[in-house]
Amino acid sequence: MAMNPKKTKKKEEDQNIVSEANVSPEPVPEETSAAEAVVEAGPPPHEVGIPPLEAEAPSLEQEIESLKKDLEEANALAAEYLDGWQRARAEFANYKKRVDRDQLIAHQTAAGNILKRFLDVSDDLERALKNRPQDGDGAVWANGIDLVYRKLHAILEAEGLKVIQAEGEFFDPGLHEAISHEESPAHESGQVIGVVQPGYLLGDRVLRPARVRVAR
């Protein structure tokens, strides 16, 4: 008796389902523990010849000593620069003073050479006024000469010229030039009796010494 094809096909499908049910499932891998991960990762770096991070970095004490050394070197260099700057400043200040002094001396020398020419004129006017007439037309003329003399001395004083005080003073070879030594009961020895020609200072420099008579 022939079998029904539909029944045969259904029977085969049932057998396939039973076979698949009998197949054991594949095991699911369990999570790896931390200890097992360390074991699988192998030994730490320092055990295989690689130094740890702490060994590579310098210690705190070494860093402090290095910074102290750098600071000492910087301070020494700054002190050297400061000393050099102070020396240069002092040298420049001395140079400036020397230049100013030389310029002042040069100015006084040039001005002195010009002013000396007017001193002779002043001496002539002064001698003329010593015997000036006291009345008449001569007195009027003398007053005019005296006015010119005063104006001339005002100009000389404005240029820094000063008269050397001599009469009654004791003889000073740096300021006076003795033309005679005379007996004078009214004066002490070495005292100036009278001034023959006035002397002048230009600043602190003697432009012309005073010519004087000195008591013995």
Image (spheres, grey):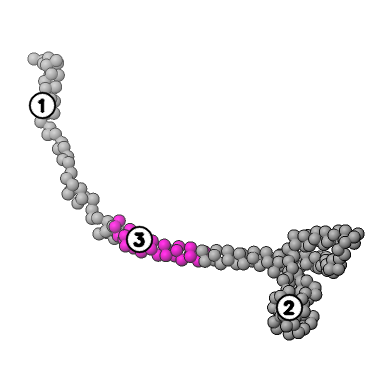
| Residue depicted at x 79% and y 82% | 180
The residue labelled by disc 3 is 63
Answer whether residue 64 is magenta in the image: yes
Q: Tag 2, which secondary structure? A: strand
Of residues 140 and 57, the one nearer the viewer is: 140
Q: Residue at x 90, y 60 (%)?
A: 136
Give me the residue at 51% from left, 64% from top. Answer: 82
Say which amino acid is labelled 3: Glu
Res. 92 image quadrant: bottom right
Horizontal side, residue 121 vs residue 206: left or right: right
Compare marks 2 and 3 and give the one earlier in the sequence: 3
Residue 1 visible, this orientation: yes
Question: As drawn, is 47 to the left or to the right of 99?
Answer: left
Amino acid beneath label 1: Val
Q: Earlier in the sequence, mark 2 or mark 1?
A: 1
* Circle 1 or circle 3, nearest the eye: 3
x, y percent for residue 97:
64, 65
Q: Earlier in the sequence, mark 1 or mark 3?
A: 1
| Residue at horizontal 34 percent and vertical 63 percent from the top | 62
Which residue is farthest right?
Answer: 137
Badges 1 and 3: C-beta atoms under 8 Å apart? Answer: no
Q: Nearer the viewer, residue 114 or 215?
A: 215
Please state, as top left, top right, bottom left or bottom right, where the N terminus lies in the image.
Answer: top left
| Residues drawn in magenta | 53-81
Badge 2: residue crowd in 10 Å (few <14, some 14–19, many ≥20): many
Q: Amino acid at mark 2?
A: Val
Q: Which numbered circle lies on residue 38?
A: none
Residue that label 2 marks: 192
Q: CA distance from mark 1 to mark 3?
A: 77 Å
| Residue linked to disc 1 | 18
Residue 71 placement (x, y as % from top left): 41, 62
1 or 101, nearer to the observer: 101
